[in-house]
Image (cartoon, helix red, strand yellow):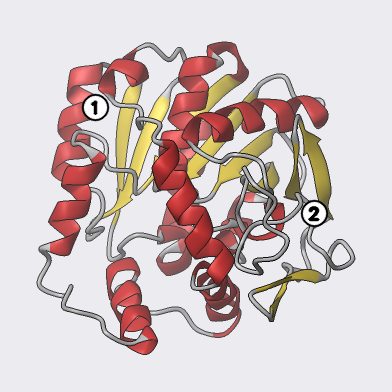
Amino acid sequence: MPNSSSNPGKHHDSRPPTSPGKGFHDGGRFYFACDYAPAAEKGFKGAGEVSLWVETEGSGPPLLLLHGGPDFDHRAFHPGMSVLAAKRKLIYVDLRGRCMSRTRQPVGLDRDVHDVAAVLTTLGIEAVEILGHSHGGYVAAAFAYAFPGRVRKLVTVGTAWGEKPEDARARVLKAPSTGAARTLEEQRRLRDSLFFLKPPEKDLRRHYDRCVEWIESPGAFDFARQYAEAGGRAPGEPELSRTLCPVLFLAGDQDPFASVEKLQAAAGRLGPRFRVAVIPECRHMPWIEQPEKFREAVESFLG
């Protein structure tokens, strides 16, 4: 990939051009790093040819959290995911090319999978439980397929199993609420309507807005183009059937991105290792809209 230092919209190094932990410049604008106080540890961890931004919270068995998108980042998990920190050590990661983990190296789903393996090795973790949200569920399942001995249990949240990803996207675009969004404000309102029954407030809103702020940046647009051009087929039922760990398909009852009916049908085809949990009265981010019900469902599965 050519050097992109002359173009502020391109990804630069794996580390941001400002001091670690502060944030980074992109397209002439400064984007703040995560300032979530309960994170016990935060910084860059080596993952082969890149360094990834990693934060940890809580204590107990490790639970790796993989954000959605593919252009979202870990800040979308704050602070709602902390409901799981009482019994587990949560590991938040910005995957390659996202937010703090920007890089000039090639990006794509296959590289995400190997980066997960590399960062777990750096952290000294051989086997782990994983929770992947939306596209992060595909990354998590692809990792479980490629490295079956390294995943104890797998939870996917709002991931469209039982249908092709492109079919799920087409279904979302046909929803009555998805009109033509011409301005940035209209796009944000549309995103809110797809993700939440009731948009978040206060700290929930602040961390989510920072995540959205970055995905509207020049660097994020460039990342999304590179990720799409890289190809990399999302795993499906054949790959899931060859994983070794128990798997939970979790979704909000009104999630437009993941059909509960199709999740249940997929779990039925895949067999007893696969379960479905439905969180009532929420859409795509149940840890924000229904944190206690979300916690109960995840802890019941993880044990």
Q: Residues within 10 Å of mark 2 (few under 14, many from 20)?
A: many
Q: Position of residue 195 (x, y in %)?
A: 34, 67
Looking at this view, name the residue that lies furthest to the right. Answer: 19
Depicted 217 relative to depicted 273: above or below: below
- Residue at numbered disc 2: 15
Dot 1 falls on a residue whose secondary structure is helix
Marks 2 and 1: in contact by CB < 8 Å? no
Compared across the picture, whether 126 is left or right of 63 comes to: right
In front: 130, or 47? 47
**Picture residue at 68% right of the left edge, 53% below the top:** 102
- Tell me the tag on residue 267: 1
- Evaluate whether residue 24 shows in this view: yes
12 sits left or right of 141 in the view: right
Q: Position of residue 238 (x, y in %)?
A: 28, 16
What's the amino acid at mark 1? Ala
Quick one: 15 or 295, which is closer to the camera?
A: 15
Q: Residues within 10 Å of mark 1 (few under 14, many from 20)?
A: many
* Element under disc 2: loop
- Location of the N terminus (image quadrant): top right
- Residue found at x 32% / y 49%: 251
Above or below, comparing residue 229 to residue 191 in the picture: above
In which quarter of the view is residue 37 placed?
bottom right
Measure the alpha-carbon separation of dots 1 and 2. 40 Å
Q: Position of residue 206 (x, y in %)?
A: 59, 80
Task: Please identify the quadrant where the C terminus is shown.
Answer: top right
Please say if 264 is above or below 30: above
